[in-house]
Image (cartoon, grey):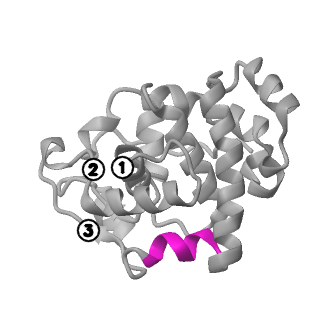
Amino acid sequence: MSAKPIETPTDLVRCDWCLGAPEYIAYHDRDWGVPVHDDRLLFEMLTLEGAQAGLAWITILRKRAGYRAAFADFDPQAVARFGPEDVLRLLDDSRVVRNRLKIESTLDNARAFLAVQRERGSFAAYLWSFVEGRPVRNAPLTLKDVPAQTPLAEQISKDLKRRGFRFVGPTIIYAYLQAVGVVNDHLLSCFRRVEVSR
């Protein structure tokens, strides 16, 4: 599934972090901060945020299509069935970050993800319950006003770890919450701030 090309006008004011590469701008303009209620996309972003640990986000963005192909289009039921032979296959797959701990954590997270779905009906219902279904709208003027983690991220991180998820520390989870729109951290000057709030 390839991303649909979008126009990226250069005269718009954007969050500073996205200005380094066309992939960043496209991701910022199309995806980042949009409230997500689709479980498959929530699993995809949880996987990608965990894979990013210790790496630049641009590295993961450039591998996103490869991740989709390698991890069954992020179908958690399919990924939960992966076994040791799949781990070995993925360790030899240049389309993904070839880190055994990250690969194995994706399999464990798929199983934990399914357990949350069974308990709560959907992962989206679980995740959005932490904010009573309404995105947190912060008002950062500059990137310095955006924290690396928050009490909300710590709370969700702790609960995910209790449920058997891995690579879900509070910094990773805060980036995840921003990515899937549970938190709107678009700068006040950014044209996307109002768009994702609709």
Labels 3 and 2: the sequence-earlier one: 3
Labels 3 and 1: the sequence-earlier one: 3
Badges 1 and 2: C-beta atoms under 8 Å apart? yes
Out of 191 and 127, give the one closest to the viewer: 127
Q: Is residue 20 above or below residue 151?
A: above
Q: In which quadrant is the C terminus drawn?
A: bottom left
The residue carrying mark 2 is: 149
Camera-side mark, 3 or 2? 2
The residue carrying mark 1 is: 170
Point 36% across, 49% down: residue: 170
| Residue 40 visible to the viewer | no
Q: Which mark is residue 9?
A: none
**Amino acid type of disc 2?**
Gln
Q: CA distance from mark 1 to mark 2?
A: 6 Å
Point 67% across, 79% down: residue: 121
Q: Dot 3 lies on which element? A: strand
Q: The magenta stretch spans which residues?
A: 122-129
Callout 1 crowding tier (Cα within 10 Å): few <14, some 14–19, many ≥20:
many
Q: CA distance from mark 3 to mark 1?
A: 18 Å
The residue carrying mark 3 is: 137
Q: Quadrant of residue 148?
A: top left
Camera-side mark, 3 or 1? 1
**Amino acid type of disc 3?**
Arg
Q: Is residue 76 above or below residue 194?
A: above
In reply to whether residue 127 is colored magenta, the answer given is yes
**Amino acid type of disc 1?**
Pro
Q: Dot 2 lies on which element? A: loop
Q: Position of residue 13 (x, y in %)?
A: 24, 46
